Image (spheres, rainbow, N blue to C red):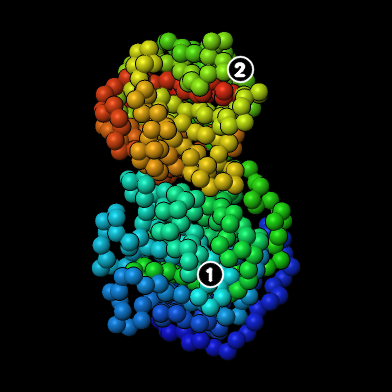
């Protein structure tokens, strides 16, 4: 039964059990019901059931159900927080009756404010409706950091594009696990069961402060919260969470053919050799002497039938070659609809070393689309920032599954068996023509490939 939650007397929660980060799930949950001391700001807090769970629902005040530019917040007055871990499950979606166009502000915004003091706070939130759009610019804004009152999302985006937001897979209305790690002026956001953060902020705008925790949503959002746990004893380096290896180990692929039977046509700036790499047979691209030290790509073109639409899958492993310049990223990927001699191509590639650095702008450049020769990455980034690249978790040198779906002028990149693409391109620059499939890597990359599987549509 729905019931409004009244603000009750202050009960300060200052001593939760002393547990390490990996044990935070056993930290007692803070009840989100009538027993919880809350200050409600521009909202009602209702006890409801949502998708099989008992939850706290933030709802507009009566008579304000159609307001469009306000926030709702339930401040937990009994929780003081400085450093540590906040974990909870949240669900958010656009409420009925609001515009559904991509550019609207009604994206199911839901999140958590922390270190709340009067009107000041730090915040991570999700834009759940963005994550599955075909417009990559909006997809890359699925998560957001902002700081009240002076650093709203728009100011942060205008002044430092890409630094305070990132892509992550979300489903509107579905329960999503969120974990926030805070140390001093740094905070990391983890979503779902990810072992790596999708968003890192190194410069929290209020510095190393202290304050309350609040459940937060835009007034146009259906917002639900459950299973809140806070561990103020956690410190950077506790447990294995932020330093763990990828949780998405690439599944074994049934090879289409033995690697020594793979028919290659022209080899551009490279030769190929069969090697064993990390327990698997692999094709290794080796740059030619003339290509050494250049800023060029290697291509090994397959000689099977030309490819227009369909699916391409391959396992890749890339890392900077020994002796490469410090700015080498281990670029590795696939070219498709490629000219007979590699003179033109569409390309999806990965920058593995970007994925786990602390610079969020670099992290958001982990995947890339380019179109050779007219549309290199730097032209696309300058002319359409954020449209042709995105974040995904990678580990340099580890086997990683790439899957590319192509139809007409649209291509989607999936990594490590993900159900949703991390990068969507709807305007392939060479249109909907056909061409070869090719293994692709930068000459500074130690590049390994498993068998390629091509399914034509």
Residue 228 is tagged as none
Q: Position of residue 429 (x, y in %)?
A: 30, 30
Q: Where is residue 131 in the image (x, y as percent from the top left)?
A: 39, 51
Q: Position of residue 312 (x, y in %)?
A: 40, 28
Residue 275 is tagged as 2
Determine the secondary structure under disc 2: strand
Q: Is residue 63 above or below residue 308?
A: below
Give the total number of marks visible in the rendering. Answer: 2
Q: Residue at x 47, y 63 (%)?
A: 151
**Image quadrant where residue 279 sits:** top right
Q: Earlier in the sequence, mark 2 or mark 1?
A: 1
Q: Could one spot residue 126 in this view of the protein?
A: no
On the rendered image, what quadrant is the C terminus found in?
top left
Question: Which is nearer the eye, 59 or 292?
Answer: 292
Question: Which is nearer the eye, 436 or 359?
Answer: 359
On the rendered image, what quadrant is the N terminus found in?
bottom left
Q: Which residue is drawn at 52% across and 42% down?
A: 362
Frontmost of labels 2 and 1 is 1
């Amino acid at each position: 039964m729905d019931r409004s939650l009244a603000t009750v007397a202050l009960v300060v929660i200052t001593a939760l059990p002393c547990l390490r980060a990996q044990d935070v799930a056993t930290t007692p949950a803070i009840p989100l019901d009538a027993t919880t001391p809350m200050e409600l700001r521009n909202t009602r807090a209702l006890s409801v059931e949502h998708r099989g769970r008992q939850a706290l629902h933030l709802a507009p005040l009566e008579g304000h159900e159609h307001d469009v530019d306000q926030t709702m917040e339930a401040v937990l007055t009994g929780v003081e927080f400085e450093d540590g871990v906040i974990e909870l499950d949240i669900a958010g979606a656009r409420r009925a009756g609001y515009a559904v166009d991509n550019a609207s502000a009604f994206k199911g915004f839901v999140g958590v404010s922390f270190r709340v003091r009067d009107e000041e706070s730090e915040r991570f939130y999700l834009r759940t409706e963005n994550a599955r759009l075909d417009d990559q610019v909006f997809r890359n804004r699925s998560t957001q950091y902002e700081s009240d009152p002076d650093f709203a999302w728009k100011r942060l985006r205008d002044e430092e594009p890409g630094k305070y937001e990132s892509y992550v897979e979300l489903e509107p209305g579905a329960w999503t696990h969120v974990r926030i790690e805070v140390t001093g002026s740094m905070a990391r956001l983890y979503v779902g069961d990810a072992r790596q953060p999708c968003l890192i902020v190194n410069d929290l705008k209020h510095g190393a402060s202290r304050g309350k925790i609040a459940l937060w949503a835009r007034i146009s959002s259906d917002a639900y919260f459950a299973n809140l746990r806070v561990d103020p004893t956690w410190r950077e380096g506790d447990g294995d969470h932020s330093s763990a290896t990828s949780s998405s180990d690439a599944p074994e692929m049934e090879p289409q053919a033995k690697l020594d039977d793979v028919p290659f046509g022209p080899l551009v700036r490279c030769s190929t050799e069969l090697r064993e790499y990390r327990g698997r047979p692999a094709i290794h691209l080796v740059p030619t002497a003339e290509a050494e030290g250049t800023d060029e790509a290697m291509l090994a073109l397959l000689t099977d039938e030309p490819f227009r639409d369909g699916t391409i899958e391959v396992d890749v492993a890339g890392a900077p070659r020994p002796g490469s310049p410090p700015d080498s990223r281990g670029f590795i990927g696939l070219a498709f609809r490629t000219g007979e001699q590699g003179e033109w191509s569409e390309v999806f590639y990965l920058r593995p070393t970007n994925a786990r650095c602390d610079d969020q702008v670099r992290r958001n450049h982990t995947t890339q689309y380019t179109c050779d020769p007219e549309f290199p990455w730097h032209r696309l980034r300058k002319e359409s920032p954020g449209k042709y690249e995105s974040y995904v978790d990678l580990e340099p040198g580890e086997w990683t599954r790439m899957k590319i779906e192509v139809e007409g002028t649209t291509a989607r990149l999936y990594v490590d068996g993900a159900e949703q693409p991390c990068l969507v391109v709807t305007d392939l620059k060479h249109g909907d023509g056909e061409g070869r499939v090719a293994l692709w890597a930068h000459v500074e990359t130690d590049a390994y490939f498993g068998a390629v599987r091509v399914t034509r549509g």
